[in-house]
Image: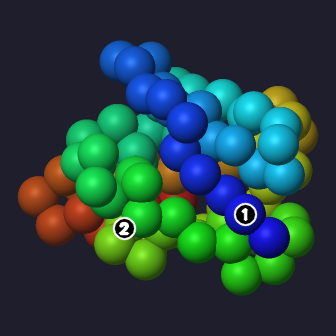
Amino acid sequence: MEVEVANMNKHGFWLLIDAEEHFVDFDHFPWFRDASVLEICNVERPGSGHLYWPSLDIDLAVESIEHPSKFPLVSKVNLRRRDTVRT
């Protein structure tokens, strides 16, 4: 089960998951916006539908990346402490 960060720009980053590219848009996933390249690239795939960034303590379902409109709850980051607060 492979996952790799394929590219990045100021709008987000692309993940290569099982030879398919998925765009992670900072507008839909704002807690990645101020993360470092190393933190974003440090991604694990503990299960086929699950991604985890241990440096950021972020868990995401692959489906939430494929269909962000199905997951309207957006987390916000307290930039001083990097705590995730759900709204």
Residue 22 is drawn in which quadrant? top right
Q: Disc 2 marks which residue?
A: 56
- The image shows residue 33 at horizontal and vertical percentages of 34, 37
Residue 70 versus residue 38 in the image, above or below: above
- Residue situated furthest bottom in the rendering: 46
Amino acid carrying mark 1 in the image? Glu
Amino acid carrying mark 2 in the image? Leu
Q: Which mark is residue 2?
A: 1
Residue 69 versus residue 84 in the image, above or below: above
Which residue is rendered at x = 80% and y = 70% of the image? Answer: 1
Q: Nearer the viewer, mark 2 or mark 1?
A: 1
Q: How is the image coloured?
A: rainbow
Distance (Cα) linking label 2 and label 1: 19 Å
Q: Is residue 84 visible?
A: no
Q: Mark 2 touching mark 1, by CB under 8 A?
A: no
Which residue is rendered at x = 67% and y = 58% of the image? Answer: 3
- Residue situated furthest top in the rendering: 10
Count up the numbered dots: 2
Residue 5 versus residue 49 in the image, above or below: above
- The image shows residue 29 at horizontal and vertical percentages of 54, 40
Which residue is rendered at x = 52% and y = 64% of the image? Answer: 43
Residue 71 is drawn in which quadrant? top right
Residue 11 versus residue 87 in the image, above or below: above
